[in-house]
Image: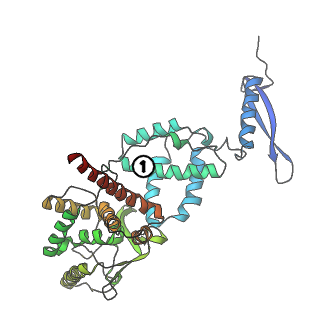
Amino acid sequence: MPRKTNFSTGGHEYFRVTATIGTGPDGKPIRKQFYGSGKKEAEAKRDEYLSNVGKGLAAGYDKALFKDVFHIWYASVLKPTISSSSAIRYDLEYDKRIRNSSLSELKLSSVRSLDVQTYYNGLLAEYSVKTVRLVHRLLTNFFNYCVKSDLVAKNPLFAVELPGIRTGKDGYNVLCRADINKILEAARHDISILIYLFAIFTGLRQGEILALELGDIDLDNNSINVTKSVKHLTINKKFAAVLNPTKTLSSIRSIPILPELKPLLKAHIETEKEKYARLGVEFNNKSIFFSTSTCDYRQATNVLTGLKRLYKRLNIPDTSFHDLRHTFCTLLAEEGVPLKTASVLMGHSDVSITAKIYTHVDSQELKKSIDKLSALFNN
């Protein structure tokens, strides 16, 4: 039996149905046509579309391509809210790994978890886990926006399996007090490694430490003023330091200086002063506190290399520079510093971020308490 059709184009026969999907600014109805190989298929497409619009999706949602909506969102929604250094980093991800990706030509409404998973798996074959997770962060923000804007019914990333990043057994790597003492003793004999001890007893982020100027270190009032961060990026094919405000408004803070740290800070300042004088560079409050041999901003990779050398020399288990920050927070928890106070010192935007580290410490203490009961079995 021949299928029933009512419309032809390009030598092909279709069944077409029409539905009113809204009204225009002039009050006239907006009508949309749906096509199928037969009446049943065309009506099914119409019913699905009207159902989705009835659930709150924007009219016309089925026509928008991923690449077009992402471009508008990226340029008009995301970029105005981020720092220039973040914008440079995200521009690179967008241009190299998203703009012409396997998702680009898909209709936004048809992007499924499997599409994204396949895309991520392809990236992993060429790029690092860290890069894939950065792309994922962008797509998460994008699809969350699409859900809020009624462009898609649900976020397809919920079922996507992300590549893992190796962490310590309990999720946080921190230095034990014996290893902290090793670094302290080493710094007393070699002031060039003060930066690592400084990180342990201030909890500053690496970018915040490297952006510090002499004027930010107030030895009279025993405080360190944190207002900015630095990162090295390639801009117009030139690798350079980019200075930005701190990560969040809550990151702008004043950190008390541990009294025992002051003599080392003074010794470091004298060393810096001598270096500046030797190079004929003026030493003032705008001078970089932890500078290179040429009085410039130090690169994060070089600082990390120095840390790894120090660990090897002192026989300390290898961890990242950021783990020095975790160490600071852990020390606060172990000394009973209130969670809210620790959150302010860490510059966290949300106290729950600090609470994760505090919970980690609490779980260790609980385990120690339970372990003490083992003595009962040995009596």
In the image, what residue occupies the spot 24% across and 72% down? 292
Residues 250 and 182: in front is: 182
In the image, what residue occupies the spot 29% across and 71% down? 201
Residue sitting farthest toward the bottom: 220
User: The residue under label 1 is which amino acid type?
Assistant: Arg
Residues 352 and 137: in front is: 352
Residue sitting farthest toward the right: 27
Q: Toward which corner of the image does residue 347 lie, by quadrant?
A: bottom left
**Could you tell whether 189 is left or right of 21 in the image?**
left
Does residue 226 appear anywhere in the picture? no
| Horizontal and vertical percent position of residue 219 | 30, 86
**Could you tell whether 8 is left or right of 86 in the image?**
right
| Horizontal and vertical percent position of residue 112 | 55, 37
In the image, what residue occupies the spot 33% across and 85% down? 285
Secondary element at tag 1: helix
| Horizontal and vertical percent position of residue 85 | 43, 65
Q: Residues within 10 Å of mark 1 (few under 14, many from 20)?
A: some
Does residue 365 appear anywhere in the picture? yes
Residues 110 and 319: in front is: 319
| Horizontal and vertical percent position of residue 84 | 46, 66
Q: Is residue 249 above or below residue 42?
A: below
Residues 76 and 186: in front is: 186
Q: Is residue 288 above or below residue 65?
A: below
